[in-house]
Amino acid sequence: PDGTADWSHEKTRKSQHAHGVSVIEGELAGPADGPRWRVVRPSPHARRITARTPMRIDGPAAGAAAMCTRDDRRGNVVFGTLANCAMGVTPWGTYLTCEENFDSYFNGLAQPTPAQKRYGIRQRAAGYRWHEHDSRFDVASEPNEANRFGWVVEIDPWNPDSVPVKHTA
């Protein structure tokens, strides 16, 4: 019903808020003959981490020229996580999620660079059309933004005020 025919800034933001990670608290509760998992509501831990959530970049790529953009000239802060897949819990209780297939979020160049070719970023291949209303996702406007995706993201589910971290190694 909402569709993509009349794509707008509002639809772009709505779509960006729908992508990412949900932190949901669950508990095993119920009758003795078969307890079931249920979502704890309200939960002090529940939150959304979206394509617009501020995150730190660490590891050897943090601060590299290829990580710098108009909005982050130091190359150590990125907004958002995309195409999250896989997960794992660390021994210290945080959550790791991996970004994959992020190329489909970006509109590429007619003549892509070798790195963009490796990523699979092509012109008019951005299925989500975010580039039409958010220049971060248009490689011609922001050539380094795609370099800031495709990493392992660490989230502390126990601290809703924590800042997620993209690990580059």
Image: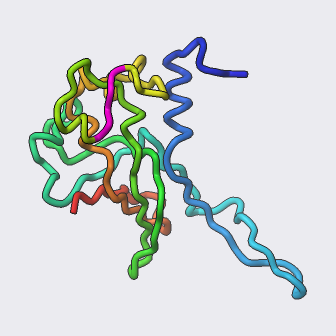
Residue 39 on the magenta segment: no
Task: Answer left or right for 96 relative to 140.
Answer: right
Q: In the figure, residue 148 lies in which quadrant? A: top left
Q: Main secondary structure of the magenta part?
A: loop
The residue segment tinted magenta is 119-123
Residue 156 is situated, as x and y percent measured from the top left of the image, at 43, 65
Residue at position x 70%, y 65% in the image: 40
Quadrant containing the C terminus in the rendered view = bottom left
Residue 87, placed above or below residue 164: below
Q: Is residue 11 above or below residue 119?
A: above
Q: How is the image coloured?
A: rainbow
**Residue at the (40%, 57%) spot, across then down:** 98
Of residues 114 and 144, the one drawn nearer to the viewer in this rendering: 114
Q: Residue furthest top?
A: 6
Q: Residue 162 location in percent, x, y? A: 39, 59
Residue 60 sits in quarter: bottom left
Q: Is residue 9 left or right of residue 165?
A: right
Q: Is residue 19 above or below residue 151?
A: above
- Who's the residue at 32% across and 27% down the image? 122
